[in-house]
Amino acid sequence: MTDDEINIILAKWAGWKRCDFTGANNDEEWWHKDGCPSWFRNTPRYTTSLNAVAQIEAKLTEEQWQEYRRVMFNAFFDGKTLDLRGLISATAAQKCQAIVRALGLDGEGAE
């Protein structure tokens, strides 16, 4: 799954909606269900921003957090050794991949 696909999947999960038209530069335009100013904007780049990942993490339920922690732990555990440094310093992309798996959204295509 590409970073763009992951960003779209997480944006949709977080409440972003794709508009039916593209912007002046042929960029896709999005809006958020919680409201935003009267103009449209692009979704957060979750896979490159730990701040954007924190916004997603804040929306997880306790059950989703438990699954997210399990997926992250397994990503840095080889059966014998836990790469604690890797776990603590996981990139935004690594966290996003784990969140998508934890939410069961890894089979979704980015339309």
Image (cartoon, rainbow, N blue to C red):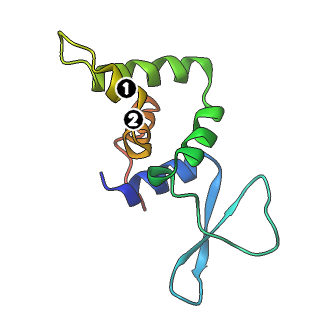
Q: Which residue is at 40% across, 33% downward?
A: 89
Which amino acid, mark 1? Leu
Rendered position, 40 above or below 9: below
Rendered position, 52 above or below 80: below
Which quadrant would residue 30 be assigned to in this image? bottom right
Instruction: Kindly give the residue lying farthest to the front in the view shown.
Output: 85
Q: Measured from the top left, where is residue 54 in percent x and y?
A: 59, 39
Which amino acid, mark 2? Ala
Which quadrant would residue 86 be assigned to in this image? top left
Instruction: Give me the disc on residue 87.
Output: 1
Q: Measured from the top left, where is residue 84 in percent x and y?
A: 34, 20
Give how far apart the Cα atoms at labels 2 and 1 are: 5 Å
Q: Measured from the top left, where is residue 73 in percent x and y?
A: 35, 19
The residue closer to the viewer here, 96 or 64, is 96
Q: How many neighbours does mark 1 have within 10 angstroms: few (below 14), some (14-19), or many (20 or more)? A: some
Which quadrant would residue 62 be assigned to in this image? top right
Residue matched to label 2: 90
Q: Which residue is at 45% across, 54% downward?
A: 48
The residue closer to the viewer here, 75 or 9, is 75
Instruction: Give me the disc on residue 12.
Output: none
Q: Which residue is at 39% across, 46% downward?
A: 93
The residue closer to the viewer here, 38 or 19, is 38
Quadrant (top left/top right/bottom left/bottom right) for the C terminus = bottom left
Q: How many neighbours does mark 2 have within 10 angstroms: few (below 14), some (14-19), or many (20 or more)? A: some
Q: Are marks 2 and 1 in contact (CB under 8 Å)?
A: yes
Q: Is residue 70 left or right of residue 34?
A: left
